Amino acid sequence: MLEIKNDKDQIENVFSEIYNRYYDLDKKSPLLFIFIDEFGKFLEYASQNEPEKELYFIQQLAEFANNSDNNIVLLTTVHQNFDAYAINLESTQRQEWTKVKGRFREITFNEPVEQLLFLASEHIEERQSAIKKEKTVNELVELLTVSKAFKTNEDYVREIAKKLYPLDAISAYVLTLSLQKYGQNERSLFSFLESTDHTGLYQHSILTDNFYSIAEVYDFLIYNYFSFLNSKYNPDFAAWKAIKTSLEKIESLFNGSISDYAKIIKTIGLLSINAQGGSFIDRDFLVLYSEKSLGIPNADKLIEDLEGKKVILYRNYNNRYILFEGTDLDIPTALYEAGNKIDDITDVVTLLNKNYSLPAVLAKRAMFETGTPRLFEYKISSQPISTKPEGEVDGFINLIFNERDILSDIEKLSSENQESILYCYYLNSKDIKDLLFEIEKTRKVIEDNLDDKVAVTELKNIVVHQRNLLNHKILNSFFGDKTSVRWIFAGKQKELKSQKEFNSFLSFICQKVYFKTPYFNNELVNKHRISTSIHTAKRNYFRALANDWDMPQLGFHKDKFPPEKTIYLSLLENNGIKLCDDNLSNLIEPHNDNGFHNLWKASVEFLDSAKLTKRNVSEFTEILSNKPFKLKQGFIDFWVPSFLFIKRDEYALFNVGIYTPTINEDILELIAKIPKDFEVKSFVLEGVKLDIFNSYRKFLNIDLNKNGNAQTFIETIKPFLVFYRSLPDYSKETKRLSKESMAIREAIATSKDPEQSFFEDFPAALGYSVAKIQKDRAELQHFIIHLQDSIKEVRNCFDELVNRFEFYLQDKYFDTNLSFEQYKLKFQIRYKTLHRHLLLNSQKSFVQRIDSKIEDKKAWLSSLAQSLVGKSLEKFKDEDELMLYDKFTDMILSLDSLNRISKTTFDEEKEIALDVQINSFDGGMASKVIRLPKGKFKDVEKLEEKIKELLSKDKSTDLAALAAVLKELL
C-alpha cells in the first residue's frame, strides 16, 4: 500500500512515489495497479475546497495513469455519476469537471433489481398482517406480470412478494429502479429500510397496515433527493416537473378527494419514468392498482375526472396514461377532420423519403472476411436506381414503390448494372399508404395549431409513434412466407427468408463486386474516417517510415506496440512487405496470403501508366476507392503514401507542379491529406533516351547507367542545378550571350522535371529533339558539343565582364598592358599625396578601395564597382556596365584635380584652394591652382553678388562670358 502523509511536500512528490513503486517491481514489463476506493469522497472534497486546484491534481493523476509509456492502471470506485459531484459548481468549473471526466472511462455497475429486492425481503421483518394480505399481494404480482411494466422473473417475484410487504411488487420495482438512478444501489436501499423519517417504511409500518405504494415511494424520493431531482442534472427533470405541475393543478381543479387524485398522479408519473416501453398502463391497470394498493375504491371515477380536466391523457398508440399539461384541442376529433382536408396519397416515394429513414446495414460476413466494414444504405424510389456507391457507403438497398408492374424493368437494369445494389420491389403498398396518410393527417393538425404548444408536443409524439410503426411495417414485409416484396440482384430474383439470410446476401454482393479487396484487419485504420488519436499515430508512422525505413520494424521498440507499430505490421510486414531485409537481392513485394497481391499489382500498374504522361495521385486514390477494391479512406490514406515511398526511386514526384526530389514525413502527410496537389511521372529509359541520358553522365564524368530511377536522375540533374545556383546574379540575367546559351540557362533555371529537362527542354533550347537525334545518331554528338559550348559561355560570362572592366582601366589610363598588381600599385601611388581628410564621402570610399590590400583581382575590381555604382560586379545588370565606366572616369578626373591642389602644399587652415581648367581648340588648355586667404572670402562674396547682377537670363551666354574672362585671367 502506498501511504502519503497530508503534507504539502509529500503531496508534491506523489508522482515520484508512484514512479518509485512502479520501477521497484523490477520486471521486464512491470504492471502497477492503483486502487482508490470511495473516490467520490475525494470528488466531494474537490468540489467544496478550491475546485480548480484540486481538480487539476485529479487531472494530472488521470493523465499520469494514461501515459502509454508506463503500464499503470488507475481504478476508482464512486457511487454516483462523475458529474453528480459537480452539482453546486459554477458553469465554468463544471465545464472543467466534464473535461477531467473525459480522462476516465466509466464502467457502470448496477446490481440486478432482483438482487436488491432479495436484500430488501431479507431485511424486512415478516409481519402477521402479510398473511392476511397474501391474496392481494398475489393479485398485485399478477398485475405486474400482465402489465409488462418491468422485466421480471415471475416465479422469483411470487416467491419474495410476501416478504416485501408492506411494499407491493410494483412499488418495490419502482423504488429499486429509482434508487439505482438517483441513489447508490444497495446503500440507498438500506438507508430507505432504516429510515425513520415520516416518509420511510418504518413510520409507515407503525401508523398503518396498508401497502407502501408507488405514491409513498414518490414522497420518500422527494423528501430525500429533492435537491438532485429538481436540478437540471437529473436526466428525468422534465418528468418530475410534470408531476409537480399536475399535483398543483388538481388542488385548483377539484374540491374533494385531493389526496386520492394526488396518489393517482404520483403513480402515473413514476411509472412514466420507470416502466419499460411496450407496457400496458391502461385504465384497468390503474383502477386495479388504485383499489388494491393505493386504497382508492372509486378510482374509475377519479381517473375519468382527471381525463375530463385534461390532467392525464391516454395514449392509444402506446397503451398508457401520461400526465398532460392540458389543451383545448380535441386531438382525436381534429385528426378525424384533418382526414377530410388532405388528398389521398399518390406520391408514396416522396412521403416515404420525408418520413422514413432506416439505418445503414453492416454486411457482417464481408467485414469478417476482409476486415473492411461494408455499409449498405437504404434508397427509396419509384424506379430502380443505378447510382454508384461513394464515400462511406458501399452499396444500396433500393426500396422501390410503384403501382405499375415494373418487375421486368428492374430485372433488366439489375442485370446490366455492375454496382452493389440490391433491389427490393414492393408488390402491395396499401398498408404503407394508409400509415403515410395518418402521418400527413397529424402533420396537418400540427400545422393548424402551432400556437398550442401542448397539443403540438403531443401530436409530435404521435408522429414519432407512427414513424416507428411505418418502420415496423416496411421491415416486416421483407421476409417470411407472406412477404410482399421481391428481391433482385444481377438480374435474378432471390428469396430471402430471414434477417440472417438478408445480411449474408449483402456479404455475397460485396464478395462479387469488390472481389479484389484485400484482408486488412485493423479496425483503427480500416474505416472511412479515422479518429483524432489515429491521426497522431499516422504522423508517427510516416515519421518512422521516412526516417527509419532501413531499420527492422521501422525502429519501433521490440516489446512495445503503439498504434503506429500495429499499423506498420498489419499494413506492410504481415503481408510480406519488408523494407529492411538482409538479402539485398529480394524484391519488395507482398505475398498473397491476405490478397495484397491484387492491390500491389494495381498500384504498380498506376505507376506504369505514368510513363507516358504525368498522373495525379488523386487518380490513384480514385482507383482504390472504386470497385473492384472500394477501400476505406482510412486504409487509402495509409496505403498510397506508403506505396509511393516504397517505389520512390521509380518515378518523379511533383507538388503543385514543382519537382520534389525528397519524400519526407511532411510530404507523406500532404500526400494523404491533399492527393490532388501531387503528380507522378515514372521514369522510362530505353533506346535513344538511354543514349542521351548516358551522354549527359559522360559529360558530367559520372558512371554510365542502364536503368533510370529517381536516384540516377537526381544524381544527373544535380550538377546542372548546382551549376546554376553557383552562378553570380550577373551570369543569371545578362543578355550578352548567344541565343542558345540564354535558352539553355533558362531551361536549367526552370527545371522542374529531370526527365522533361533531359529529353525535351535541354535539346529544344539548342534546336534539337529526341526524334531528330533518333533519326541521326551523329546529331547526339553535335548536341553534346553544343551543350558544352553553351554551358561554358554561361559559366565564363562573368569573367568576361571582369576582363572588360580591366581592359577599360588599362586602355584609358596606361600606355602598356600591366598586370593586376602593377596597375593597382600605380593607382595607389597616383593618389598617395591626396589630402584624404578633405574628400567627400564618395571620394574617400573610392580611394579606400584603391588602397585596400585585397589580392584577388575580381574582388578588388568588384569593390571599386561597389563604391561607384552601389553594387558589386556579381550583382550587375547589363546597363550597369556603361554607368560604371562613366562614373569611374568622372571620379578619376575629380581626384586628379584634387591631387594637383594637394601638391601645392597650401595651408588648409588659412587658405582655400581651387583647381581651374579651361580647354578650347583655339587656345588649348589653360589651368591654374588658385589659392586665396580665408580672410578675403567676404570680398569674394561681394564680387560674386555684383557679377550675378550683371548676368543675363541666358545660361549659355553667361557661361561663355565667364569662361572668356577666366581664360584671360589664367
Image (tube, rainbow, N blue to C red):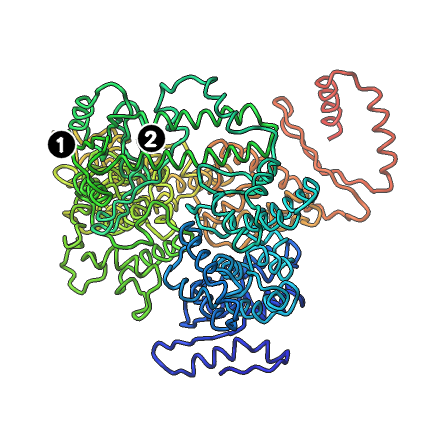
Question: Residue placed at 55% from the left, 63% from the top?
Answer: 183
Q: Amino acid at mark 1?
A: Gln
- The one nearer the camera, 576 or 837, is 576
Whether residue 693 is visible: no
Q: Amino acid at mark 2?
A: Ser
Residue 18: x %, y % from top left: 49, 78
- Residue that mark 2 sits on: 738
- Image side of residue 745 versus residue 452, left or right: left
Question: Which circle's residue, 1 or 2, is located before the other in the chain?
Answer: 2
Residue 774 — which label?
1
Characterize the local packing of mark 2: few (<14), some (14-19) or many (20 or more) Cα atoms within 10 angstroms.
Answer: few
- The one nearer the camera, 454 or 610, is 454
Give the secondary structure at mark 1: helix
Characterize the local packing of mark 1: few (<14), some (14-19) or many (20 or more) Cα atoms within 10 angstroms.
Answer: some
Q: CA distance from mark 1 to mark 2?
A: 26 Å
Residue 238: x %, y % from top left: 58, 46
Hey, which quadrant is residue 656 in on the image?
top left
- Establish if 453 lies above or below 902: above
Quadrant including the C terminus: top right
Hey, which quadrant is residue 946 in on the image?
top right
- The one nearer the camera, 87 or 608, is 87
Residue 912: x %, y % from top left: 78, 42
